[in-house]
Image (cartoon, helix red, strand yellow):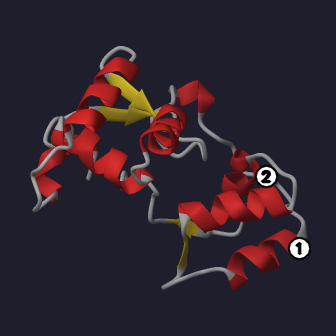
Amino acid sequence: MTHSDAGNYAAKHQDRSIPEILETSIREALVENRLSCSRAHKLALETGFSPADVGRTADLMEIRLSGCQLGLFGHEQKEKIAAAANPEPKLIKTLKENLTDGSLSCLKAWQIAADFKLKKTDITAACEAGKIKITPCQLGAF
């Protein structure tokens, strides 16, 4: 969904059912009517729902997600992630080996960050430098 679709997040979902417990948990977690990526993932762990379920429910509730842990959305312009000038060749090779249909999934990006003992945003910077697109999002934001 694009910025022009903001406020109409539910339109991308066929199934319109909202689990009551998840709706309540999301409402309690909101800050300025937004749900951060990290809080959404914590809710998934706490409630037993998947991150995708949390993201879909937030969409159906017309809640905007913020603070992507990869730095891809929901940050002020000054907080956007800058591309690393020279990422380690082994890292770029690993990223490219983990592409599916030409892109790296958010989940794979997280796993590679853990494997290389890097911050998640370092993976995003390396992807920017290597012209690698990250998608899909675990929450369904992109």
Dot 1: element: helix
In this figure, which residue is indicated by the disc labeled 2?
Answer: 84
Residue 65 is at least partly visible in this image: yes
| Category of crowding for the residue at label 2, using alpha-carbon neighbours closer than 10 angstroms: few (below 14), some (14–19), many (at least 20) | some
Observer-nearest residue: 35 or 132? Answer: 35
- The residue depicted at 19 percent of the width and 36 percent of the height is 20
Label whose residue precedes the other's in the sequence (1 or 2): 2
In this figure, which residue is indicated by the disc labeled 1?
Answer: 89
Q: Quadrant of residue 57?
A: top left
Observer-nearest residue: 110 or 41? Answer: 41
- Residue 41 at x, y percent in the picture: 51, 42
Task: Report the side of 74 relative to 87 (left or right).
Answer: left
- Residue 83 at x, y percent in the picture: 71, 50
Residue 106 against residue 47 in the figure, above or below: below
Alpha carbons under labels 1 and 2: distance apart: 12 Å
**Which amino acid is tagged 2?**
Ala
- The residue depicted at 34 percent of the width and 28 percent of the height is 25
Observer-nearest residue: 124 or 36? Answer: 36
Q: Looking at this rendering, what residue extends furthest in the top direction?
A: 32
- Residue 61 at x, y percent in the picture: 18, 35
- The residue depicted at 75 percent of the width and 64 percent of the height is 112
Task: Report the side of 73 relative to 3 (left or right).
Answer: right
